[in-house]
Image (spheres, grey):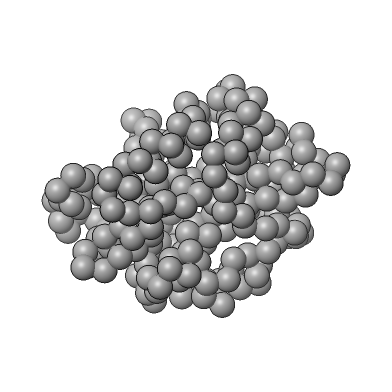
């Protein structure tokens, strides 16, 4: 069902929970920062690439950067109801709308700038299952937005390197094996005049996007 967002999430134990994809803004970014980022991610003893991210600043700064480049941005959250009946964000993405598609830069795509999932202790605090599968649904949100924008599901992203070899390999493997995106490799030294190709770029072309969409149709 290209262009249709998921409406439930699966746990690693095989159960399901209702969910909704919302398009947010600064208010939603601030809520995440106060209720997820600061208490659970910034203070986490475990490695997290997003440990020092400030989502309100990221949303404001990248919105300005992309507007100067003639592109729009979008910010999406996956929300679920807590045990108290209130909505709680379990993951979010920030994307550029109309970014040149790496394999064919004449075509537009969605570039997934930032992705974050709530850690297990944040989910437990909301009375939610702490084993939610979130990475594929978050990438899927960007792919469905690409379909909605008329880009045939085309998606590009960069698996940012932290400098920690083990974690860098783990993130790369999640995008390649877990999500099943296509590695861009080092076929081109420059991604664009501003971006050097470090071998950590991924994309979904039209066929890949349809395949990934079909694999998550059971959540729509």
Task: Answer left or right for 148 relative to 29.
Answer: left
Residue 36, percent from left and from top: 63, 33
Left or right of residue 122: residue 188: left
Q: Position of residue 125 (x, y in %)?
A: 76, 34
Vertical placement of residue 60 versus 90, above or below: above
- The residue at the point 58 percent across, 71 percent down is 4
Residue at horizontal 26%, vertical 68%?
Answer: 107
Which residue reaches farthest right? 84
Pick the residue in front: 39 or 14: 39
Give the quadrant of residue 154: bottom left
Position in image of residue 201 (x %, y %): 30, 52
Query: Residue at coordinates 28% horizontally, 53% vertically from top-left?
Result: 70
Q: Residue 199 at x, y = what percent?
A: 25, 49
Which residue occupies the foreground of this view, 44 or 94?
Answer: 94
Q: Is residue 64 visible?
A: yes
Where 166 falls versus 213 (above or below)?
above
Residue 209 is at least partly visible in this image: no
Locate the C terminus by quadrant.
bottom right
The quarter of the rendered structure image containing the N terminus is bottom right
Q: Quadrant of residue 57?
A: top left
């Amino acid at each position: 069902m290209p262009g249709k967002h998921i409406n439930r999430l699966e746990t690693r134990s095989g159960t399901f929970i209702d969910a909704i994809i919302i398009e947010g803004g600064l208010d939603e970014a601030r809520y995440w920062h106060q209720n997820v980022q600061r208490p659970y991610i910034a203070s986490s003893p475990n490695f997290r690439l997003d440990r020092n991210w400030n989502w309100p600043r990221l949303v404001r700064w990248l919105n300005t950067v992309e507007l100067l480049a003639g592109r729009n941005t979008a910010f999406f959250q996956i929300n679920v109801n807590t045990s108290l009946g209130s909505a709680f964000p379990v993951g979010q993405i920030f994307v550029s709308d109309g970014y040149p598609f790496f394999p064919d830069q004449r075509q537009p795509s969605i570039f997934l700038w930032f992705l974050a999932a709530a850690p297990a202790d944040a989910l437990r605090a909301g009375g939610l299952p702490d084993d939610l599968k979130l990475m594929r649904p978050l990438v899927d949100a960007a792919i469905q937005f690409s379909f909605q924008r008329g880009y045939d599901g085309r998606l590009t992203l960069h698996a940012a390197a932290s400098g920690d070899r083990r974690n860098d390999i783990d993130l790369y493997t999640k995008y390649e094996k877990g999500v099943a995106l296509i590695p861009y490799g080092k076929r081109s030294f420059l991604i664009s005049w501003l971006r050097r190709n470090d071998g950590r770029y991924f994309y979904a072309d039209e066929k890949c996007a349809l395949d990934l969409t079909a694999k998550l149709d059971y959540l729509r």
